[in-house]
Image: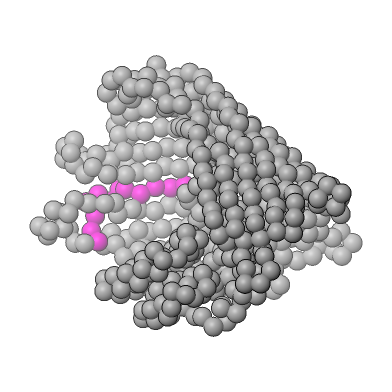
């Protein structure tokens, strides 16, 4: 997934969900989902210029202002320019441009916003190469066999959000329009097909429109403080070009396939969260999704692969949470989650009966692929206890952190220690002894700790030594 259109300094929060257990998450949320929010205003104007090795240069300017006290409107704007050549013998020549314009009023729970975003980039890539080419001295370790691999891409979007909330409930609505394009030139197999090379171009041109509407209602103590939620999601992908071409030095020599795709996804969901006892609550929900696909095919062996397909699915979800309990378990919850989810298949695979490469017979794939997940059994509440461990722990740079002092430590303390080990290894990615020691110690700790610590390990690897523990564990529940 290309996240280069994001400007980190503008991010106000990250919300993670794992597994197939949340009714609000639909297509491609079988493993989990992450939601990234931008700020509505900045406390002060920001100008940042940075430089580093390999031709890295970055300039960022951002700021916000109130457009008259009587209007209640705030305008945020930002521009980012990036250049990077990377460590390669053939300079990457990455040029990236980002721009953001956001008009907002009120707050996230009672307000509205309108955002314009633009991202463009182009680069020259050093692809993977045969080991023998390095071994025989034909190229260096960071060398390239093809000088024209790389690509260009853009993402332009407009989106709006509106929210109203009260003691009785809340309503949220959002809509978006995205113009996306990609031309990617790759040569993964080298020169199997001859001295001209095996370079190909992948093309994607699409216009994405969609929206989300959800209403929540609080029923009060007579209904055990049940919170009901009902929502609808809609997304339409109008893909005018989805192609694969044989190329030489980025010039097309053959059309392998050239398709147009129309795909519409519609989902409805409902959920009830109930506090049955002080130590027991449940989250029960169900989701219904329908995906409609239509493919127009082109290409020598691909011409007959067009058609239409559709799929639908019911996805029930159930979660039970036990705790916290008085005494030693006042910071611990036991939980069990079960849920069904799905991901949609490439629309072209749902209608294809012949290989676009050689015309041989192939089988169609299902429009929706069902997934079922379950997890448990223990979670640690990370409020004051976590803060105390954060104050006593720090990420070490350039050295291996101390080994785990005691496997009787609390799960949070173990997580802090494991994070130290992993962060130190990430800070020295070329020190094989450092990495081996970190992995050995971390794996030893993880084998004896809960599956929850394994999840924390993944979060640290994803955040790559983010420096502050709480930032790596946002929305951990």
Q: How many marks?
A: 0
Q: Residue at x 31, y 48 (%)?
A: 149
Question: Where residue 287 sits in the image (x, y, percent)?
Answer: 64, 36
In terms of secondary structure, what is the magenta stretch mainly?
Answer: loop
Q: Residue at x 51, y 54 (%)?
A: 3
**Between residues 422 and 47, which one lies in front from this camera angle?**
422
Q: Is residue 397 visible?
A: no
Query: Residues in magenta?
Result: 142-154
Q: Point out the residue furthest to the left here.
A: 136
Q: Is residue 188 above or below residue 266?
A: below
Quadrant of the rendered image containing residue 245: top left
Q: Quadrant of the C terminus?
A: bottom right
Q: Is residue 418 left or right of residue 264?
A: left
Question: Where residue 168 sits in the image (x, y, percent)?
Answer: 86, 50
Q: Is residue 465 above or below residue 275?
A: below
Q: Residue at x 48, y 33 (%)?
A: 369
Applied colour scheme: one colour
Q: Point out the residue furthest to the top here.
A: 304
**Between residues 44 and 294, which one lies in front from this camera angle?**
294
Q: Point out the residue furthest to the bottom here.
A: 392
**Between residues 110 and 382, which one lies in front from this camera angle?**
382
Question: Where residue 376 sits in the image (x, y, percent)?
Answer: 54, 53
Question: Where residue 19 sits in the image (x, y, percent)?
Answer: 53, 48
Q: Is residue 204 left or right of residue 384?
A: left
Q: Point out the residue furthest to the front here.
A: 327
Q: Residue at x 43, y 47 (%)?
A: 152
Q: Is residue 349 magenta?
A: no
**Between residues 391 and 123, which one lies in front from this camera angle?**
391
Q: Is residue 145 magenta?
A: yes
Q: Is residue 181 visible?
A: yes
């Amino acid at each position: 997934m290309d996240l280069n259109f994001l400007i980190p300094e503008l991010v106000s929060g990250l919300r993670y969900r794992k597994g197939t257990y949340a009714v609000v998450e639909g297509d491609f949320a079988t493993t989990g989902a992450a939601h990234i929010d931008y700020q509505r205003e900045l406390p002060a104007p920001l100008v940042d210029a940075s430089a580093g090795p390999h031709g890295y240069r970055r300039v960022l300017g951002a700021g916000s202002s109130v457009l008259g006290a009587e209007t209640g409107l705030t305008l945020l704007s930002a521009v980012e320019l990036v250049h990077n050549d990377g460590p390669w013998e053939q300079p990457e020549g990455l040029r990236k441009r980002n721009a953001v314009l956001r008009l907002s009023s009120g707050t996230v729970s009672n307000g509205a916003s309108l955002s314009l975003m633009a991202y463009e980039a182009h680069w020259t890539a050093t692809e993977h190469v045969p080991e023998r080419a390095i071994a025989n001295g034909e190229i260096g370790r960071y060398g390239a066999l093809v000088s024209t691999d790389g690509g260009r891409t853009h993402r332009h979007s407009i989106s709006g959000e509106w929210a109203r909330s009260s003691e009785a409930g809340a309503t949220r609505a959002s809509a978006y329009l995205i113009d996306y394009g990609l031309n990617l030139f790759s040569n993964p197999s080298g020169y199997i097909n001859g001295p001209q090379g095996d370079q190909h171009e992948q093309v994607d041109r699409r216009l994405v429109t969609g929206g989300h509407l959800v209403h929540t209602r609080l029923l009060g103590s007579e209904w055990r403080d049940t919170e009901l939620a009902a929502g609808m999601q809609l997304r339409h992908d109008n893909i005018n070009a989805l192609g694969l071409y044989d190329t030489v030095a980025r010039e097309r020599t053959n059309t392998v396939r050239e398709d147009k795709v129309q795909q519409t996804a519609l989902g409805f969901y409902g959920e009830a969260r109930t506090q049955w006892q002080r130590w027991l609550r449940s989250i029960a929900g169900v989701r219904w999704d329908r995906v409609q696909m239509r493919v127009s095919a082109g290409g020598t062996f691909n011409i007959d692969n067009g058609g239409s397909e559709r799929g639908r699915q019911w996805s029930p979800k159930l979660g039970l949470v036990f705790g916290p309990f008085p005494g030693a378990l006042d910071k611990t919850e036991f939980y069990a989650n079960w849920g069904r989810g799905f991901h949609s298949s490439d629309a072209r695979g749902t209608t294809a009966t012949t290989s676009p490469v050689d015309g041989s017979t192939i089988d169609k794939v299902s429009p929706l692929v069902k997934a079922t997940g379950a997890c448990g059994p223990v979670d640690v509440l990370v409020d004051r206890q976590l803060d105390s461990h954060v104050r006593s722990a720090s990420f070490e740079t350039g050295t291996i952190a101390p080994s785990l002092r005691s496997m009787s430590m609390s799960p949070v303390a173990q997580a802090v220690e494991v994070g130290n080990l992993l962060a130190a290894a990430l800070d020295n990615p070329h020190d094989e002894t450092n990495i081996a020691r970190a992995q050995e110690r971390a794996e030893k700790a993880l084998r004896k700790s809960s599956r929850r610590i394994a999840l924390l390990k993944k979060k640290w690897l994803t955040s790559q030594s983010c420096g502050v523990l709480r930032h790596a564990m946002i929305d951990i529940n």
